[in-house]
Amino acid sequence: MSKKEYSFLLYHSAHFLKMAISFDRRKRLARPDGVGKKTGDCGDTVEIFLAVSNNRIRQARFEIDGCQNTNATANAVCHLVEGKSIESAWQITPEMVAAFLETLPENHFHCAELATGALYMALTDCHRTRQEPWKKLYR
Ligand code: FES
């Protein structure tokens, strides 16, 4: 292990490391109930996919085009919303994502804002899907 890798591991919390390097939630959902995609000023993109039943988020998945901090924040957003009601998911904030990760670098707080923004778009899309469920068939 290089000195750089070693100091990365020493610096970060267990939550951050798990969210930054695990890819089990990084996939598209087939026919999601809600999709939200947002690109930040930095050029990174986060896309969030939600599967909902009985007003609860059964599964949350993501795709990113971005760095490790973007992966950590998108993964954390999905982790934090799974099992929650749609109304509770709206309460998730970038500050909560950063607090959960514990060691998100301050100069990458915008990654938490981007991931949360994609979540809000996916939640808005869930409302649309509820009103017009047939649209889900064309995803
Ligand atoms: Fe811009 Fe992560 S570096 S969203």
Image (cartoon, helix red, strand yellow):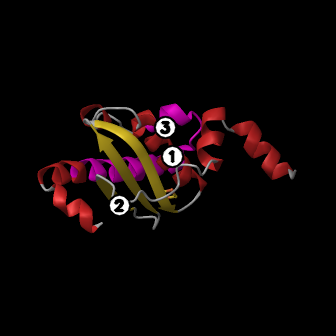
Instruction: Tell me how far mark 2 sits from mark 3, CA to CA.
Output: 20 Å
Main secondary structure along the magenta-highlighted residues: helix
Nearest the viewer among 56 and 81 is 56
Type of the residue with mark 2: Lys
Task: Give the image quarter of residue 81.
Answer: top left
Crowd around label 2: few <14 · some 14–19 · many ≥20 (10 Å):
many
* Residue 37 badge: 2
* Residue 98 badge: 3
Picture coordinates of residue 125 (x, y %)?
A: 23, 54
Crowd around label 3: few <14 · some 14–19 · many ≥20 (10 Å):
many
* Extent of the magenta region: 97-124
- Among numbered discs 3 and 1, the one appearing first in the sequence: 1
- Among numbered discs 2 and 3, the one appearing first in the sequence: 2
Kindly tell me whether mark 3's CB lies below 8 Å from ligand 1.
Answer: no
Nearest the viewer among 56 and 40 is 56
For residue 69, say whether it is visible.
yes
Which residue is pictured at 56% across the width and 42% down the height? 104
Residue 51 vertical position relative to residue 55 in the rendered view, above or below: below
Type of the residue with mark 1: Asn
Which residue is pictured at 17% across the width and 60% down the height? 134
Task: Give the image quarter of residue 102.
Answer: top right
Asked which secondary structure carries label 3, the reply is: helix
